[in-house]
Image (cartoon, rainbow, N blue to C red):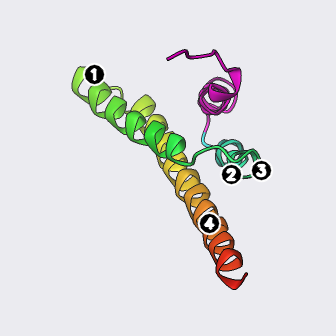
Amino acid sequence: MSSKFSFKQFIPHLLVIASILSSYFIFHDESLLTPTVFIALVPIFSILKFDGRILVGYGILMFMLVVIFLCASNDYSSTKTFTIYAYWLLVTGVVCLVIEYLREERKREKENSI
């Protein structure tokens, strides 16, 4: 069993990490640009047909990091920021999964009508 290195499989992970880092370092305040960065992932994931579960997985991971940060320190400002990022990751992940579901339903309807 040979496994070839494919850069395409890492692209969705890099997009999510780039969104988190750009939101944290560039748009650190709670402006309208932070949700825009995460909402921009929806068309990217939909057009390139990446799995929406990646976004949901990162959202859950971010929530786990929030719990660890809260246990380790009392810095509520950074945990609040990470909670907002986790929320937007979950929202965009669910939207991508709904789009994927609707595509599959249309595909099944076309197959059944033929």
Distance of mark 3 from mark 4, alpha carbons?
14 Å
User: Three-letter amino acid code at disc 2?
Assistant: Val
Label 4 environment density (alpha carbons within 10 Å; few <14, some 14–19, many ≥20): few
Please name the residue shown 47% across and 36% down the image.
58
User: Three-letter amino acid code at disc 4?
Assistant: Glu
Q: What percent of the width, then of the height, locates residue 94?
A: 52, 58
Say if 5 sits above or below 24 in the image: above
- Provide the residue designation for mark 3: 47
Whether residue 7 is in magenta: the answer is yes
Q: Which mark is residue 104?
A: 4
- Determine whether the residue tagged by mark 4 lies in a helix, strand or loop: helix
From the image, state whether disc 4 or disc 2 is nearer to you.
Answer: 4
Please name the residue shown 71% across and 77% down the image.
110
Distance of mark 4 from mark 2, alpha carbons?
17 Å
- In the depicted view, which residue is nearer to us: 39 or 5? 5
Quadrant of the image containing the C terminus = bottom right
Q: Is residue 78 left or right of residue 17?
A: left
